[in-house]
């Protein structure tokens, strides 16, 4: 399988294994479930060669030198730990965690004014920590863009834990027009609309920006949608710090995104370059939180460069990047 094609990577362990760990988590508690992460980590390290190679490539880019099996295993274990914690977060068992928030004042001010906000996240840490804020403030509306079909076993398990999850999902598997209209409606309702913007799908219009010293492709559609809808954009990073601690950090990014057509390429590139800079900043602070286990830099793809979309209405743009 093409190691740059993250969308069609099979779920690790299969449906039965995912449901087993979910059952252990629900009935045996977090301590017992976390003990199971060690054999899971060993399985992924030994069996999933593509993910292991992607982890090594990323860590060596970050560290600037060769890394050993221990660092790669720690990287995989951190990912497994955050997947496990999703079970508890979505089941409403937030008391198990020490979640510290920062930068929420501008977000709450915008929402308090009845304005919808686009919250751009990434596959860095746990984006599900954002749900904790919504649980702490039931008056806040949250909609999450995600592909129901991708990683279906995990999605089904999480939906069982929190039936309300289905009500707040905007399905990224729809066509681009339907996605934009759904996002527009949610913003008009004064909701936070959360989506991941670091992962470009194969064939999706993208823009190259430097990350860890090399260009990587970032999706153009989220920024074009933000420009079309003229909504405020904030960044969110739910960084896992080990044990039961998460740091949920919000950053104001743009009061409004405006990309007029005459300067489209220039302004779109500038926005994505600035976003990539903030992503790298947090990545260096929490290096094992990077959960793009595929060839993110497309090192075997000579075509990795700026691939800007043709001129067309934003409502016709392909859907934004999706969550793991």
Image (cartoon, rainbow, N blue to C red):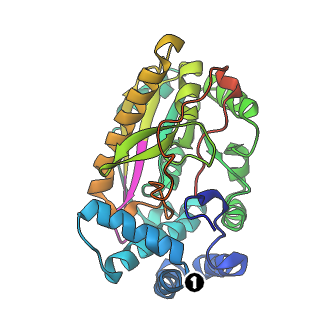
Please give left or right for residue 251 compared with residue 153 in the image.
left
In which quadrant is the C terminus drawn? bottom right
* Residue furthest out toward the front: 302
> Does 252 lie within the magenta span?
no
Q: Nearer the viewer, residue 266 or 35?
A: 266
Q: Nearer the viewer, residue 21 or 79?
A: 79
Residue that appears at 58% across and 52% down: 323
Residue that appears at 62% across and 20% down: 311
Please give left or right for residue 186 compared with residue 274 in the image.
right
> Does 240 lie within the magenta span?
yes
Tag 1 secondary structure: helix
Q: Residue 180: x, y in percent?
A: 68, 29
| 310 over 75 or under it: above or below | above
Q: Residue 261: x, y in percent?
A: 53, 13
Q: Residue 38: x, y in percent?
A: 46, 86
Find residue 114 and report its image quarter.
Answer: top right
Determine the main secondary structure of the stretch shown in magenta.
strand
Which stretch appears magenta?
Answer: 236-247
**Is residue 80 among the parts visible in the rendering?**
no
Q: Which residue is mark 1?
A: 28
| 278 over 238 or under it: above or below | above
In which quadrant is the N terminus drawn? bottom right
């Amino acid at each position: 399988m093409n190691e740059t094609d993250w969308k069609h990577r099979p779920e690790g362990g299969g449906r039965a294994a995912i449901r087993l760990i979910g059952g252990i988590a629900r009935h045996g508690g977090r301590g017992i479930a976390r003990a199971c992460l060690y054999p899971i980590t060993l399985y992924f390290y030994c069996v999933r060669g593509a993910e292991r190679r992607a982890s090594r490539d990323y860590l060596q880019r970050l560290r600037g030198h060769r890394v050993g099996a221990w660092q790669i295993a720690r990287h995989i274990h951190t990912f497994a730990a955050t997947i496990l914690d999703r079970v508890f977060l979505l089941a409403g068992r937030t008391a198990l965690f020490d979640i510290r928030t920062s930068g929420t004042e501008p977000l709450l001010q915008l929402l308090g004014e009845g304005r919808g906000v686009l919250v751009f996240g990434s596959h860095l840490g746990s984006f599900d920590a954002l749900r904790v804020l919504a649980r702490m403030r039931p008056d806040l509306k949250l909609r999450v863009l995600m592909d129901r079909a991708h990683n279906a076993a995990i999605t089904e398990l999480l939906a069982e834990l929190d039936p309300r999850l289905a009500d707040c999902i905007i399905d990224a598997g729809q066509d681009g027009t339907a996605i934009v209209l759904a996002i527009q409606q949610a913003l008009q309702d004064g909701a936070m609309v959360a989506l991941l913007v670091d992962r470009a799908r194969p064939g999706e219009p993208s823009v190259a920006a430097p990350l860890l010293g090399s260009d990587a492709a970032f999706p153009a559609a989220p920024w074009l949608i933000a420009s079309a809808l003229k909504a405020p954009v904030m960044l969110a990073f739910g960084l896992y710090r080990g044990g039961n601690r998460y740091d949920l950090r919000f950053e104001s990014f743009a009061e409004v995104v405006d990309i007029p057509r005459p300067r489209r390429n220039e302004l779109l590139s500038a926005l994505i370059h600035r976003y990539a800079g903030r992503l790298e900043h947090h990545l260096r602070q929490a290096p094992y939180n990077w959960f793009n286990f595929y060839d993110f830099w497309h090192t075997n793809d000579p075509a990795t460069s700026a691939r800007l979309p043709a001129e067309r209405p934003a409502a016709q743009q392909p859907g934004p990047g999706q969550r793991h």
